[in-house]
Amino acid sequence: IWLSALLYPDKIDFDPMEEIQSYFRLFYHAELTETQFRRLWMYLVDGMTIDEIGEKEGVSHQAISLSITTTIKKIKKYF
């Protein structure tokens, strides 16, 4: 899903966030907030650093780091 959105963003006819959220709900029993999903996407898919994400969102390095760490722990909880 994310690869389609990354390589062919103008050709996909679905909402990647909704599809990935559905996947996480089904397989990991994890409900990600929009903020958690966005930050994780920027970090893992877009390859942004924690500082770059913090600058873009106007929050501290610590806030982004905690958010991403918490999100990954939430996903791993059922893994």
Image: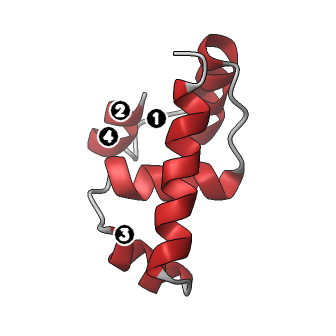
Q: Are marks 2 and 1 in contact (CB under 8 Å)?
A: yes
Callout in the foreground (1, 3): 3
Q: Type of residue at label 1?
A: Ile
Residue 14 in view of the camera? no
Residue 60 coordinates in the image, percent (x, y): 51, 83
Q: Type of residue at label 2?
A: Ser
> Helix, strand or loop at disc 4?
loop
Image point (57%, 59%), residue name: 67
Classify residue 20 by image quadrant.
top right
Q: Type of residue at label 3?
A: Ile
Residue 72 in view of the camera? yes
> Helix, strand or loop at disc 3?
helix
Callout in the foreground (2, 1): 2
- Real-space CA distance between mark 3 and mark 2, rounded to the nearest whole angstrom: 24 Å
Image point (49%, 51%), residue name: 69
Q: Is 61 or 27 nearer to us in this picture?
A: 61
Residue that label 1 marks: 12
Q: Specify the label residue 4 is tagged with.
A: 2
Residue that label 3 marks: 50
Q: Residues within 10 Å of mark 3 (few under 14, many from 20)?
A: many
- Which tag, 1 or 3, sits closer to the chain's start? 1
Residue 39 vertical position relative to residue 56 in the rendered view, above or below: above
- Real-space CA distance between mark 4 and mark 3, rounded to the nearest whole angstrom: 25 Å
- Real-space CA distance between mark 1 and mark 4, rounded to the nearest whole angstrom: 7 Å
- Which tag, 3 or 2, sits closer to the chain's start? 2
Q: Residues within 10 Å of mark 2 (few under 14, many from 20)?
A: few
